[in-house]
Image (tube, helix red, strand yellow):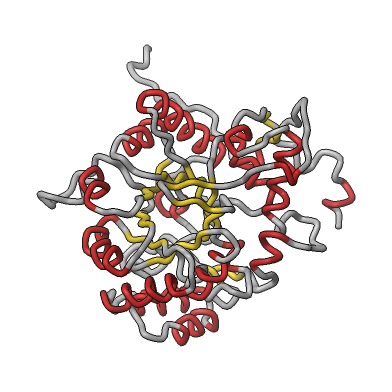
Amino acid sequence: MSIPYLKDLRQAYGFDDVAIVPGTTTLNPDMTDVQLDVGELRFELPILAAAMDAVVDPQMAIAYGRMGGLAVLNLEGLQCRFDEPREILQRVAAADKTGATAILQEAYRAPVRDDLVAQRIQEIRAGGVPAAVAATPAKTKQLALVAEEAGADLFVVQSTVTTARHISHSLRGLILSEFVDQVSMPVIVGNTVSYQGALELFREGIAGLLVGVGPGAACTSREVLGVGVPQVTATIDCAAARDKYYADSGRYVPIITDGGIRTGGDMCKAFVAGADAVMLGSPFAGTAEAPGGGFHWGMATAHADLPRGVRVEVGQRTTLQRLLFGPTSRTNGSENLAGALRTCMAMVGARNIREMHQAEMVIAPAIKTEGKLYQLSQ
């Protein structure tokens, strides 16, 4: 009996499945350039702090901005619903896992307040750093107007999956090409994991693309919905779309691997796969400057009907300084991420991030266990 149709499956790879091959030329780490350009904005570090309640508040955004990085504030989070969100954050930290979700669901019933959106942006700007903010597609048109008037420098349109072709009951939903033209801020959009999805989003005129569906430590979308692509493959596919779009249009749009990065090694693999920057949640949530008190939860944890996140305990065991620049005594790659990136770039002979894209990578599922008997037994 012949089978009229057979769905093809291809192999996809995550960070633990691959390894970076050293280059034939090496250089001093201090000769590397890791800057990130988004529109006309330039950042010294290609590492973004995720727009999550446990990760970014105005104080954290200012502290990280002064270090040369970019922290994104969630305009639909607790910071823009309550004058004093600290009390709710403390209750979430003190509750058990189930209770924490219920507390967040209750808290998110409070409306987002335009006055608090403007106030938080102005607080960040008053700290002398760019203010980057995020909203879901459903709230983007409403909140972008408030954010732009308040002086926001960059706007992120973010949901679990974002496409350029969305079908809804609304006659005039969010049309990204129109939105990008209407606002003066560069617009980053996400998330996506496919070549075609990325290519269509680039054609909307966006300034940056977030790559990743469900890899975050606190996200359960892959378990709840079964949707996602491992980050190395997702980044490679979206980078191919970026390069195709650049060849056709002459406009280079950075892609940002968002989620699933635990160590400097994971981060370096993302760049070799084609990322221009990465976005981190849990590593930043573990810093003393983060508002979550050592806990972290996914953006969809508070969904009223179908939560797709869970509160996890990451502990407050580091600082922004140690996380990004060291010095550190940890040997697991969880601190001095900027140092890890520069050292890896030096080993593959890459002077900048775009040269890092040219480094070779191999499929190597034994990369973390080969010869590591004593490490694994302790």
Residue at left offset 26%, top offset 74%: 114
Q: Is residue 279 above or below residue 371?
A: below
Q: Which residue is at the front of the view, 249 or 84?
A: 249
Judge from the rendering whether residue 375 lies leftward or rightward of residue 131; answer left or right: right
Residue at left offset 67%, top offset 70%: 319
Residue 282 position by quadrant: bottom right
Q: Is residue 170 above or below residue 92?
A: above
Q: Which residue is at the front of the view, 69 or 274?
A: 69
Question: Where's residue 365, x and y in %?
Answer: 70, 36
Number of numbered discs visible in the structure rendering:
0
Question: Where's residue 263, x and y in %?
Answer: 67, 53
Q: Quadrant of the N terminus?
A: top left
Residue 33 position by quadrant: top right
Question: Where's residue 307, x and y in %?
Answer: 39, 64
Residue at left offset 38%, top offset 52%: 160
The extreme left residue here reads 171
